[in-house]
Image (cartoon, rainbow, N blue to C red):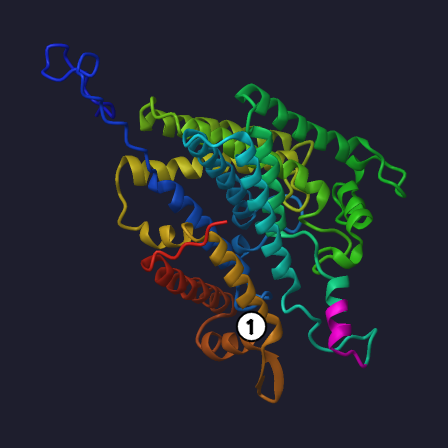
Amino acid sequence: MSTGAAPRSSSERYDATTSTVAPLAPKRERLLSLDVFRGMTVAGMLLVNDPGTWSAIFPPLEHAEWNGWTPTDLIFPFFLFIVGITTYLSLTARRARGDTDSAVVKQILRRGLIIYLLGFAMAMFPFYQWGSIDAIPNAGAWDRILFRIEHVRILGVLPRIAIVYVCAALLTLRTTVKQQIIIIAALLFGYWFAMTLIPVPGENVVGALLLHTKDRNLAAYLDRAILGTNHTWIGSVTFDPEGPMSTIPAIATAILGVLAGRWIAQRDKPLLDRITGLFAGGSVGMMLGLMWNWSFPINKNLWTSSYVIFTAGMACVALATVMWIVDYVNVKWWTKPFVVFGVNPIVAFVGSGVMARLIYTLWHVNYQGKSIALQDAIYQIVFLPWLPPRVASLAFAITFVLLWYGILLVLYRRNIILKV
């Protein structure tokens, strides 16, 4: 089966080389698989972030304890990878419209700032410290606002997306493929050398001997030095999984996505050839990542160089699979829910994050004489009585995903799409 059009004969009545009628411009190729892949990633993020209880989770839905990986550890790099793909497609479209470099740079910086501020607002929500404050027994409203500001997390998932997007977009705006490969190599090898060869202050040993620790490696030291313990992730305090040092190799994840976007956009190549190329490149990346793992372990919290190569390879293979099913074989009956998630990822992330903060932390109800979070009450009343704990926890998470599918479906049908 050929994917290309049959060549015209010069004896045909219409010949674009001699006709005075201008030929029609080629239609812009729209790959549904890109929205589906992004939507699968967003839906997966909601599924793993919102269990019925954190004490009963199936292992594939948990992050790896430290080194190694689970399916959950693929979600964030997959999202950064698709950010890179859409960045290339977006910049190409803007150039085709005649936008100047100055206008494009302004748009990149504006978009990055908006994404960062959305993430910061989520970290600040509800914008004052809820509950009692040990250090301030009689805290007033202003005390609670100041305390929140003094302890807000500066970095996080959306802030990392913002920083990575801006850096990847600017670094690839006018660089060639060769230059982009050099940038990726510099980021990944530079990070590897820094994390393993530089002695960690106060430890008197090189970083390679401390990679197995969570709070003694170079990245953790810089997290505390730059952010301070009041502004790191509350789940660790001594380090931040989205800290400044580990954000550097994450930029390479997005640039690898840019390279994938460049490959996907080559419409002069048959679609099957592009899909095959993604499969091949992804398989090589996975193999290289697993080999690099021997000396620089795959680790999401540190976003190690081996993790970058391995997850980018996995993203290529996963996207190629979706492209083959959806755009080549044309099996699309199952794609609608993922398209709904994929076209409104910011709404899904911010909205679900705020809702989770409300029901997991802020909104308490009285249950059996105790004040517990609304999420815990729903889990215990609705799911736990008739399901084993892990299944009940998963059922809660699936319900949460379906709830947000319903919300996003309403927006989709009304063509309400939040773009930044």
Identified by mark 1, the residue type is Ile
Disc 1 crowd rating (10 Å Cα; few below 14, some 14-19, many 20+) is some
Per the image, the residue denoted by label 1 is 359
Q: Nearer the viewer, residue 276 or 270?
A: 270
Asked if residue 143 lies in the magenta stretch, the reply is yes
Q: In front: 175, or 132?
A: 175
Q: Nearer the viewer, residue 286 or 80?
A: 80
- To which quarter of the image does residue 317 belong? top left
Let me know if residue 216 appears in the view.
no
The residue segment tinted magenta is 138-146
**Image x and y of residue 13, in percent:** 9, 16
x, y percent for residue 51: 53, 64
Camera-side residue: 179 or 299? Answer: 179
The answer to whether 401 is drawn above or below residue 333 in the figure is below
Q: Main secondary structure of the magenta part?
A: helix
SS type, badge 1 = helix
Residue at 62%, 60% (x, y): give it: 121
Q: Quadrant of residue 399?
A: bottom left
Residue 9 in the figure: left or right of residue 239: left
Relative vertical location of residue 411 with respect to residue 173 in this rendering, above or below: below
Residue at 54% from the left image edge and 73% from the top image edge: 375
